[in-house]
Image (cartoon, grey):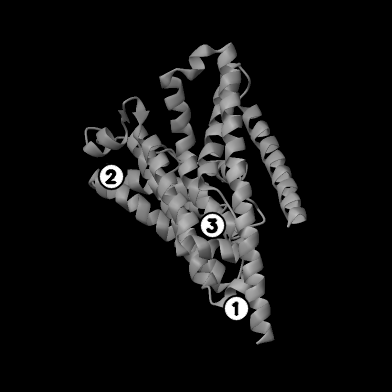
Amino acid sequence: MAGTGRTLGALMAGTAAAVRMRRVAEVHEFGVTAVLVILCAAVAVAHPRFLAARSLANIGQQAAFFGIISLGMVFLLAMREIDLSVGSNYALTTIVAATLIKDGLQPWLGGLLAVLLGIALGAVNGVLANVFRLPVIIVTLGTLTAYRGFGLVVSGSVSIGGQPVDSHFYGWLGRSYGKIPFIVIVFAAAAIVLTVVFRASPFGFAVRAIGSNEEAARLTGYPIGRTRLLVTMLVGGLCGLSGALTLAFFGAADPGVGTGYELLVVAAAIIGGTSLAGGSGSVPGALLGALIISVIGAGLTQFGVSAAWGTFVTGAIIVTAVAFDAFLRRRAAARA
């Protein structure tokens, strides 16, 4: 009984901490929004056309390609896990769908297959992590290379074009609606749905409880392995969804697509307020983080700065965000 009491006490303490960190995350969302507005205003002072509708649409579109995946990464980070294979998963699903469509598969089925394949690849990560009792980051160190290599085999290391661009799949999913690219609309809709799931569903509560105190969550009855599997499948499915939308927009697949997305996806989530310490996260923050990364890249281009500096700036922002998160956690703990 004493052990059960301690377990419940630990879980309640972890839950209370998660509530406090959720409030911190909400405050962080306002701060990230302010940073995004300031960045846009700063660039627009020197380049007023930066705020033109077409320019903003391009920024949102570039953010959406990796930002959709970052929404799922919030769930993994909240469980103290990281998936490093997201870029390779995204590339493989895009390449496989493009190859099959080129060989005669109906484009809509190809897009659906991309999503299902992404879920399957995510499930492989989750199953391996559970069976061998390894952190997801260790498993995906291997699948990162395996998925990328298989994509190169399927594509023959060359771009896959020749898609039937007259199909409604490309006409509807690859177009803009009122100057807003369809992928941006999907990005926003996915953020709304996953925010509700993360904050208000039993699944989201389980993710946060496990991230706050895994041992207490296990003893209380939370299915750790199953939850981890479902989250890796969610991340994989979002990789496939982004891959399908990428194919619809470009009408082609390149074997190098998604290279470096591992950094961008994790960076967007961390910049948006999701902590590496687990137990809390912010799906809207991940959306804002992706936009900030895209604005930085576009802004540097406007000023004629090498794109390589974008990676440096993104890394510097990650360090700053992690340090700021640690400061907020220490402050919240001191108040508690």
Q: Residue at horizontal 55%, vertical 42%?
A: 285
Q: Residues within 10 Å of mark 3 (few under 14, many from 20)?
A: many
- Residue at figure coordinates x 70%, y 36% from the top left: 316
Q: Quadrant of the N terminus?
A: bottom right
C-alpha span from label 3 to label 2: 25 Å
Find residue 305 and report its image quarter. Answer: top right
Q: Quadrant of the C terminus?
A: bottom right
- Name the amino acid, label 1: Leu
Which residue is pictured at 56% across the width and 38% down the height? 289
Q: Quadrant of residue 138?
A: bottom right
Residue located beneath label 2 in the image: 101
Which of discs 1 and 2 lies nearer the camera? The answer is 1
Instruction: Judge by depth and name the residue closer to the eye, 252 or 203.
Output: 203
Can residue 319 be seen here?
yes
Q: Amino acid at mark 3?
A: Thr
Comparing labels 1 and 3, the label whose residue is closer to the camera: 1
Q: Earlier in the sequence, mark 3 or mark 2?
A: 2
SS label for mark 2: helix
Whether tag 1 and tag 3 are in contact, CB under 8 A, the answer is no
Q: Where residue 190 sits: x, y (%)?
A: 41, 46
- The residue that label 1 is drawn on is 219
Of the residues shown, which amino acid type is indicated by label 2?
Ile
Instruction: Point out residue 192 in the picture as x, y percentages from the top left corner.
Output: 42, 46
Give the residue pinned by disc 3: 143
Q: Position of residue 32 (x, y in %)?
A: 60, 36
Mark 1: which secondary structure? helix
**Above-or-below relation of 261 to 53:** below
Report helix, strand or loop for mark 3. Answer: helix
